[in-house]
């Protein structure tokens, strides 16, 4: 039987060299693995890791433009591009729970990066505020259409001569929500008196603050040749009677231009609620109330309404309070209140 050959000295030296190389490589791998997660061997180390992680979370949350989701153990939010790809970045911080005890950070849905191990607690709380934004309704133009109409069979007429005149004070009928209106035309019942072509009248729109002698807003002249010898409708157009206030009385005045015999205005013997008829003999310097009669008149114009305002409420995230404990002892705990200047909207 052959005796078993022993290792030579050279073989033993070579084997020890190979073992040394392998041991060195294994040690390097273990060292790199240890460095991948910050050291938490001492209370100071644990506190330092917790504070560093929260500082990083704070630096990113402070520039967040949107918060996609958040609960007590994790938050996902959007920040401006930091990777250089031209797109905003989505970041998630999450505690994996008491089983694995890891706090991770995930960038744009990639592989989670371990920020801290042996995490016994990671708690987030949120401070929000409700914001109300009121949007005014849109404007809408309506017309031209009827703003006022007072009609009847004229029982009599008022003769206009030597700067005599008639005025009717009334409030145009406008829908709720009207914010301004304009008068485009006035129709009156009128006839000519005297020699054809003689004289004329001024049809005025006045503000009724000192009814009926308020400020003249618009005026149009009507020549006697425009009138018939019998009572008929005369339409007078206006281009600058705009920006009027709904709900306020307005005056339409018809004043003879100063001739001895010019024309007559149709009136009917019935007072109309909400109107007042006045007479003047001096071109409108003074007026006398004429009770029991109303000037035959219709007014056409346009008005602007504004839709109802709408109010929308939203909830903004103002602050996130974070608490992180590495290890079991309170000495490894760090807390931070993080303000969010951009106030991202949350559900």
Image (spheres, rainbow, N blue to C red):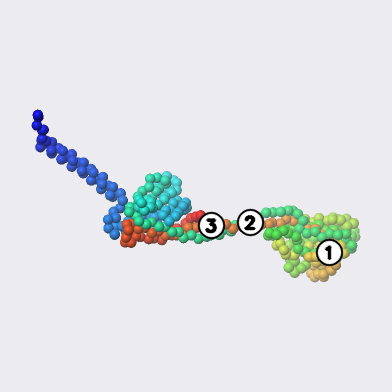
Q: Is residue 240 visible?
A: no
Q: Residue at x 85, y 58 (%)?
A: 189
Q: According to the image, label 2 marks what residue?
A: 137
Disc with the residue nearer the chain's start (2 vs 1): 2
Residue 210, image x, y percentages: 75, 69
Q: Is residue 233 left or right of residue 206?
A: right
Element type where label 3 sits in the image? strand
Q: Residue at x 71, y 54 (%)?
A: 142
Disc with the residue nearer the chain's start (3 vs 2): 2
In this rendering, the count of numbered labels is: 3
Q: According to the image, label 1 marks what residue?
A: 294
Q: CA distance from mark 2 to mark 1?
A: 38 Å
Q: CA distance from mark 3 to mark 2?
A: 19 Å
- 185 or 100, which lies in front? 100
Any mark on residue 221, and which? none
Q: According to the image, label 3 marks what residue?
A: 314
Q: Nearer the viewer, mark 2 or mark 1?
A: 2
Q: Which class describes the residues within 10 Å of circle 3: few (<14), some (14-19), or many (20+)?
A: few
Q: Which class describes the residues within 10 Å of circle 2: few (<14), some (14-19), or many (20+)?
A: few
Q: Residue at x 82, y 60 (%)?
A: 150
Element type where label 2 sits in the image? loop
Rendering quarter of residue 183: bottom right
Residue 286, image x, y percentages: 80, 70
């Amino acid at each position: 039987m052959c005796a078993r050959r022993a290792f030579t000295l050279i073989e033993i030296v070579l084997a020890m060299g190979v073992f040394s190389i392998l041991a060195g490589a294994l040690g390097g791998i273990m060292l790199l693995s240890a460095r991948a997660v910050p050291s938490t061997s001492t209370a100071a180390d644990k506190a330092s890791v917790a504070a560093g992680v929260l500082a990083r979370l704070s630096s990113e949350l402070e520039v967040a433009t949107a918060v996609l989701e958040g609960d007590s153990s994790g938050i996902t939010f959007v920040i401006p591009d930091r990777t250089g790809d031209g797109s905003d970045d989505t970041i998630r911080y999450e505690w994996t729970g008491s089983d694995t005890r890891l706090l991770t950070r995930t960038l744009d849905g990639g592989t989670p990066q371990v920020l801290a191990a042996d995490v016994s607690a990671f708690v987030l709380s949120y401070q929000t505020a409700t914001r109300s934004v009121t949007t005014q309704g849109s404007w809408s133009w309506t017309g031209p259409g009827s703003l006022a109409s007072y009609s009847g069979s004229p029982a009599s007429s008022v003769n206009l001569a030597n700067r005599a005149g008639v005025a009717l004070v009334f409030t145009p009928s406008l829908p709720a929500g009207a914010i301004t209106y304009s008068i485009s035309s006035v129709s009156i019942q009128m006839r000519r008196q005297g020699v054809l072509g003689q004289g004329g009248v001024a049809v005025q729109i006045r503000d009724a603050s000192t009814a009926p002698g308020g400020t003249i807003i618009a005026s149009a002249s009507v020549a006697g040749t425009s009138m018939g010898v019998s009572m008929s409708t005369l339409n007078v157009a206006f281009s600058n009677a705009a920006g009027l206030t709904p709900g306020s009385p307005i005056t339409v005045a018809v004043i003879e231009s100063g001739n001895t015999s010019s024309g007559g205005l149709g009136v009917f013997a019935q007072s109309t609620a909400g109107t007042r008829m006045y007479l003047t003999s001096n071109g409108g310097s003074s007026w006398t109330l004429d009770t029991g009669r109303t000037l035959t008149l219709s007014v056409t114009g346009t008005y602007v309404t504004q839709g109802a305002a709408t109010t929308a409420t939203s909830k903004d995230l103002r602050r996130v309070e974070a608490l992180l404990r590495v290890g079991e002892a309170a000495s490894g705990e760090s807390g931070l209140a993080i303000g969010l200047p951009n106030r991202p909207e949350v559900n």
